[in-house]
Image: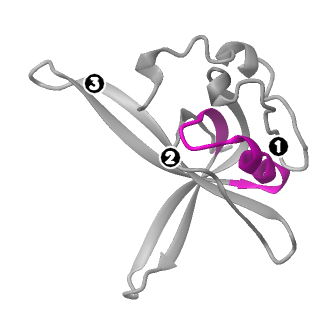
């Protein structure tokens, strides 16, 4: 048995960009920033930002385009996927992305609280798996320390 599951809470680095496949399926791409805070050897507090490429498919992609904006605080679940490609200079490259299967907006009214959550493939709108909504709340548990910007 193997597991490939990612859970992230962070802020969008840009508005979702939505395109459609030749079969008419929507696909959204955006970046998500997460932060790690730590103390260096001198005891000074440091912050490291990690940027994640996010891919969302189907009705969720359309929901993302409608409700998500740069700076939105987001909870998401998905899986890591690698993509191999050849760059312009004919060098082989590997890219890592998160294929999102559910997301939920967090934060205050300015961040879009109250907007719908997007569920799994084929579901138009659905709350995240049981327990996550209660666990994450509507952002009231999120402090300034949790915000990556």
Q: Is mark 2 on a helix, strand or loop?
A: loop
The label on residue 13 is 2
Q: Is mark 3 on a helix, strand or loop?
A: strand
Which residue is found at the position 36% from the left and 87% from the top?
89
Quarter of the picture containing the N terminus is top right
User: Does 11 sit left or right of 75 as displayed?
Assistant: left
- In percent of width and height, residue 23 lies at 87, 74
Q: Is residue 100 above or below residue 45?
A: below
- The x, y position of residue 98, in whole percent, is 59, 50
Is residue 114 inside the magenta stretch? Answer: no
Residue at left 51%, top 77%?
Answer: 85
Measured Cα–Cα span from mark 1 to mark 2: 23 Å
- Find residue 120 and name its label: 1
Choose the circle earlier in sequence order: 3 or 2.
Answer: 2
Q: Which label's residue is closer to the chain start, 1 or 2? A: 2
Can you tell which quarter of the image residue 128 is in? top right
- Looking at the image, residue 149 lies above or below residue 93: above
Left or right of 97? Residue 20 is right
Question: In what element is the residue under mark 1?
Answer: loop
- Percent x, y for residue 50? 40, 43
Mark 1 surroundings within 10 Å by alpha-carbon count, few (fewer than 14), some (14 through 19), many (20 or more):
many
């Amino acid at each position: 048995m193997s597991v490939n599951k990612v859970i992230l809470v962070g802020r969008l680095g840009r508005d979702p960009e939505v395109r459609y496949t030749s079969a008419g399926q929507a696909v959204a791409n955006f970046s998500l920033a997460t932060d790690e805070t730590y103390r260096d050897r001198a005891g000074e507090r440091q912050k490291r930002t990690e940027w994640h490429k996010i891919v969302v498919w189907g009705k969720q992609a359309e929901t993302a385009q409608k409700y998500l904006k740069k700076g939105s605080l987001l909870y998401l679940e998905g899986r890591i996927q690698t993509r191999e490609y050849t760059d312009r200079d004919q060098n082989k490259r590997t890219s890592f992305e998160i294929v999102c299967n559910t997301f939920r907006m967090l934060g205050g009214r300015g961040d879009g609280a109250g907007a719908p959550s997007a569920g799994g493939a084929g579901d138009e709108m659905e709350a995240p798996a049981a327990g996550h909504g209660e666990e994450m709340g509507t952002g009231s548990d999120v402090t300034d320390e949790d915000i990556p910007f």
